[in-house]
Amino acid sequence: MRVIDATKGEIIRGAETYPYEIADDKVRIKLPFYVDLKKLTAILKQKEYFVANDPEETDSQGWGKWYDAEGYYPYWVYEENHCHYFAFPPEDYKVVPEPGAAPRHVPILGTKAVEEFFRWLPVLKEAQSKGEPERTP
């Protein structure tokens, strides 16, 4: 892993590089391929996950182990600027002192988040769109 700062960098494994950033209280990892949302939805349902969206109607999919009537799921794949991103809440934080106040807990990409990404990467690759060429991040 190459860290540019606590909230931005690259996850490197072998020849694969995945740029990441912490934004909007989520770890956002840019994927070097498109995800077929229909295929992803089918895989997730087969694994007994609840999904947020009908893949025919939207350009994103969220999922979680428990049903949420309002669709607040921890894991998301979405398209932004012609790229697909995988996002989820960080579980690693650094404590930043605040003079005269309680310390702030700032989300970072740590060991737990990297493990979580690599846990989902095989599923995301399985759902990779065959119609689009791989792209470099």
Image: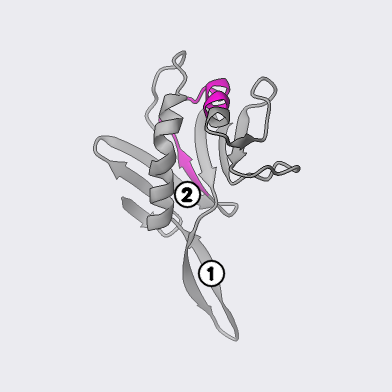
Residue 41 is covered by the magenta coloring: yes
Any part of residue 33 in sight: no
Q: Residue at x 45, y 38 (%)?
A: 30
Query: The residue tagged with tag 1: helix, strand or loop?
Result: strand
Residue 20 percent across, percent down from the top left: 44, 46
Instruction: Compare residues 15 and 121 and report the one nearer the observer.
Output: 121
Q: Which residue is the site of mark 2? A: 21
> Gap in Å between the C-alphas at discs 1 and 2?
16 Å
Mark 1 nearby-residue class (10 Å; few <14, some 14–19, many ≥20): few
Residue 125 percent across, percent down from the top left: 41, 28
Q: Residue at x 52, y 27 (%)?
A: 43
Q: Which residue is the site of mark 1? A: 105
- Which mark sits nearer the N-terminus, 1 or 2? 2
Q: Residue at x 70, y 22 (%)?
A: 57
Residue furthest bottom as drawn: 100
Disc 1 marks which amino acid? His
Q: Quadrant of the C terminus?
A: top left
Residue furthest top as drawn: 131
Residue 96 percent across, percent down from the top left: 49, 74
The vertical placement of 75 against 101, above or below, is above
Disc 2 marks which amino acid? Glu
Q: Residues in magenta?
A: 27-43
Residue furthest left as drawn: 14
Residue 127 is covered by the magenta coloring: no
Residue 103 percent across, percent down from the top left: 55, 78
Instruction: Compare residues 25 and 88 and report the one nearer the observer.
Output: 88
Residue 33 lies in quadrant: top left
The vertical placement of 16 against 133, above or below, is below
Nearer the observer, disc 1 or disc 2? 1
The vertical placement of 57 against 106, above or below, is above
Mark 2 nearby-residue class (10 Å; few <14, some 14–19, many ≥20): many
